[in-house]
Amino acid sequence: MTGSENEKTPQKFSQKDYHHPAAAWGAAFSVGRVLVEQGAIVDGVRAIFKMNHENSGFDCPGCAWPDDRKGLRMDICENGIKHVTWEMTKKRTDREFFSRHTVTELLGWSDFELENQGRLTEPMVYNATTDHYEPIAWSAAFELIGRHLRSLSSPNRASFYTSGRLSNEATFLYQLFAREYGTNNLPDCSNMCHEASGRALAASIGTGKGTVDLVDWQTADAIFVMGVNAATNTPRMLSALADGVKEHNLKIVHINPLIEVAATTAITPHEILDMVTFRATPTSSLNLQPRIGGDMAIMRGIAKYLFEKFETDKSSLNMDFIEKYTSGFEEYRAACDATSWEEIERQSALSADQIKAAGEIYRQAPAAIISWCLGVSQQEYGVDTIREIVNVLLLRGNIGRPGAGPCPIRGHSNVQGNRTCGIHHAPPESWLSKMDAACGIKSPRQHGLDTVRTIEAMHSGEVEVFFGMGGNFASATPDRDRTFEALRNCKLTVHVSTKLNRSHVVHGKEALILPCLGRTEIDQQAAGPQAVSVEDSMSMVHLSVGMNEPASPHLLSELAIIAGMARSTLPQSPTPWEQYTGNYDLVRDKMAEALSGFENFNERVRKPLGFRLSQAARELDFETPSKRANFSTATLPDTLPPPGKLIMSTMRSHDQFNTTVYSDNDRYRGVKGLRTLLLMNEADMKERGLEQFDLIDITSFAKDGSTRSVKDFRAVKYNIPRGCASGYMPELNVLCPIGDFSAQSDQPMMKQVLIEVIGHK
């Protein structure tokens, strides 16, 4: 179909650039629409005044941004309210629904249609004869799981996945069960998201976490925001950025192939006067648009600029800090000297002057933070890039002091807490030995399978049972077709969920759906209503207490589901699973024994705002082999695509949280009614004879020579560097080869996919 023919054809989709501030009235109207659609107007408004309130409210089940330390009473955002309202919906996916629809039929539904059916109400088991899910008693469900797990020839033939939704208490019990059962097969969403961050930071400064907190964000003189669409991923970040600009002239540099709305202006909805007067605050001092994969070149360029300025201005580098706390400085200086500006410009797709402008903002800032998200970590050289970020911070001593440091932006609420509390396929011996001593078990020492290797093991038959604790594994993972085949090859798949999703209809030979309480719901146990804890993106641990009656009387808590499965699988287990389920304080007491930093857990977590986990690097105690912060000297990689090809990055729309799609719109990118699209540079479109909304086929090229394709997508003109393209996940996950993962992090390269685009004739 040609462009002119497209213009004559009535279309239900459109794209128009968005020129309004981030958040503001657009967010307010969007929230109102969702409250009405889900029939949750009263509960939704109540939630606004309970979400993210210390020790009396519930933690937002969306992103992991920390709660405000200044007593903000409406510490909320559009996407958080959407996420909560989606959970509080009055719609129900009950036994009558499943009796009306076969799994084969549901497989043809969209991700939105599946989740929009509402909350799951009771455990369901798949009947292969009828192709329907049917009700099953909890006891029978646990016995089915236990029977399968007990029959395996090795515990390593099962894999226990989790997304970031688990509380700290449930996380601890989940890993305890898996290790008592006998396996470290504990893959998680971090394997796909921030594994590169953890490995890079551990190598550079001896910790897998960032060193800053929200107070640092509120006092920094400059903040670099790399590879993240803040208005969608962590909208509450906008408050910190806007407040910094208004209060002390904060300088903000955004580095992203797309100039997102958060990198322009914002009006935070809780600033009532700003809303009424339409007074927007600038949220960027400089926007840099590198090509995909060009982030490391920018950081190397900033470092090179600092070395050049040091020749005439000795304050450009903090030599006292470098000499006292770092290792490898001279080797790093040599690496910067050996990297030419021409190569930096070629790899970044930016001019030297643009990079030097960013370098000057950084040089003039007394204290600076560099933050990043998946746009940096989901690349082949993500570890090298993040280590280069730390290099730049070390050059000016921007670590271990107020308003400064590295800051990975975690996506899902408590994904960082999951790792802290034991979800790790390759835990260190020190962690295992302390946990074993506290819990009276002997954990296996053999490293387990991460997410990519779990998929491959299911595909080959080496893993026969898959347990998914939250999330939507089938949609979140790369290489959709191979992942689907892997799940269907299992003898049993089990998913603990609140709503129906793709993973329930792409299942093993036997399959269970186990519905659990949501974060917003009252968790009533033997000892009374229970609270759980979470760790935010900046290492604060605090309580979360549900406020609503459960969506169904048949729902169990995450902890109760884990305990039921554990007792059925390990009937002679000495672990007091039933006691833990009845009183979460007992779990926290055991965690205080087992986990460093959780001493006096029950007492400290009940303090206003909870407590911050201590971190040696924040105190300039670097737990690396050198006992210093280490400069990295990696060579600048060549990330340019070959002629005729593009590098594609997957992303999510604004009306989406992870794999949960709220609508086919993407307000901030001006897209309406369309998800099967590819954002392209106008010159790249013309080179291929494409006009706006032309139909295209997209083919990806794996390192092993294999290809994957999608058909009948739409080419959409957008401000993105030449040679780059971007489109939505999960629709484009099919193009991400399972074998194309970073050798540095083992992460799938979902932000760096080599593609070819062919228009329809």
Image: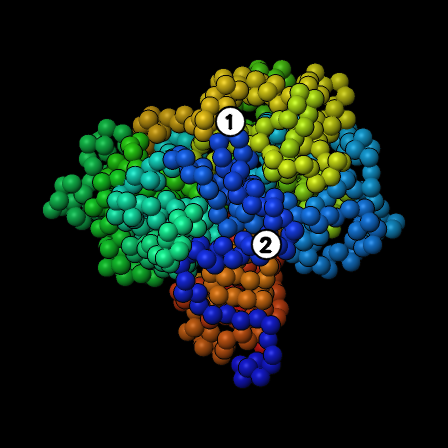
Q: Image point 32% across, 55% down: which residue?
A: 282
Pointer 1 or 2: first along the chain:
2
| Whole-percent x, y for residue 13 in the image | 57, 71
Q: Nearer the viewer, mark 1 or mark 2?
A: 2
Q: Name the image quarter holding residue 460.
A: top right
> Is residue 477 toward the left or the right of residue 680 in the image?
right
The residue that label 2 is drawn on is 34
The residue that label 1 is drawn on is 428
Q: CA distance from mark 1 to mark 2?
A: 44 Å
Along the line of sight, which residue is nearer the eye, 17 or 509?
17
Q: Report helix, strand or loop for mark 2.
A: helix
| Whole-percent x, y for residue 221 in the image | 26, 43
| Whole-percent x, y for residue 41 in the image | 60, 49
> Is residue 311 toward the left or the right of residue 76 in the image?
left
Q: Is residue 438 visible?
A: yes
Along the line of sight, which residue is nearer the eye, 739 or 717?
717
**Residue 648 to residue 608: above or below:** below
Name which residue type carries label 1.
Pro
